[in-house]
């Protein structure tokens, strides 16, 4: 594998090549020994507020999914993965918050 002067892998990397974890290039926070790229600079400036907003959106999507499925519109189940995605991104933002 190609390496730069600072002993981090070049642009191409594999998680199993580094025993301490993979190095993800780009801006972000360090979470449990590896870098995590945040979606935008706004997320880096306001991680708690964005995480709270994502949790509220996730709860709204779960409630909407429940209402749609209870009223016989089973296509509402398609909203569940998006709710899970919002919860996951909120968890990731809260873990990357250095405060």
Image (spheres, grey):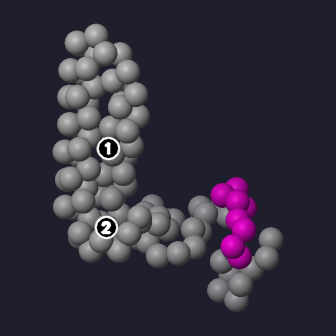
Which quarter of the rendering shows the C terminus?
Answer: bottom left
Residue 8 percent location from the top left of the image: 66, 77
User: Which comes sooner in the sequence, label 2 or label 1?
Assistant: 2
Residue 40 percent location from the top left of the image: 38, 69
Q: Main secondary structure of the magenta part?
A: loop
Residue 69 percent location from the top left of the image: 28, 16
Q: Residue at x 25, y 55 (%)?
A: 51
User: Is residue 16 part of the magenta span, yes or no?
Assistant: yes
Distance between mark 2 and mark 1 Cα atoms: 15 Å
Q: Residue at x 70, y 89 (%)?
A: 5
Name the residue beneath numbered marker 1: 87
Residues in magenta, as a range: 10-17
Q: Which mark is residue 43?
A: 2
Residue 88 percent location from the top left of the image: 37, 46
Q: Which mark is residue 1?
A: none
Instruction: Answer with left or right where residue 78 lies relative to residue 65.
Output: right
Mark 2 and mark 1 in contact? Answer it, CB < 8 Å: no
Instruction: Answer with left or right where residue 36 lies relative to residue 73.
Output: right
């Amino acid at each position: 594998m190609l390496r730069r002067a600072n002993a981090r892998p070049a642009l191409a990397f594999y998680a199993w090549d580094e025993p301490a974890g993979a190095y993800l290039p780009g801006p972000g926070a360090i979470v449990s020994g590896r870098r995590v790229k945040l979606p935008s600079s706004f997320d880096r400036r306001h991680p708690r507020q964005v995480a709270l907003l994502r949790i509220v959106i996730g709860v709204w999507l779960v409630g909407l999914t429940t209402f749609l499925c209870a009223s016989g519109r089973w296509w509402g189940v398609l909203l569940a993965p998006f709710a899970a995605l919002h919860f996951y991104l909120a968890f990731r933002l809260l873990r990357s918050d250095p405060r």
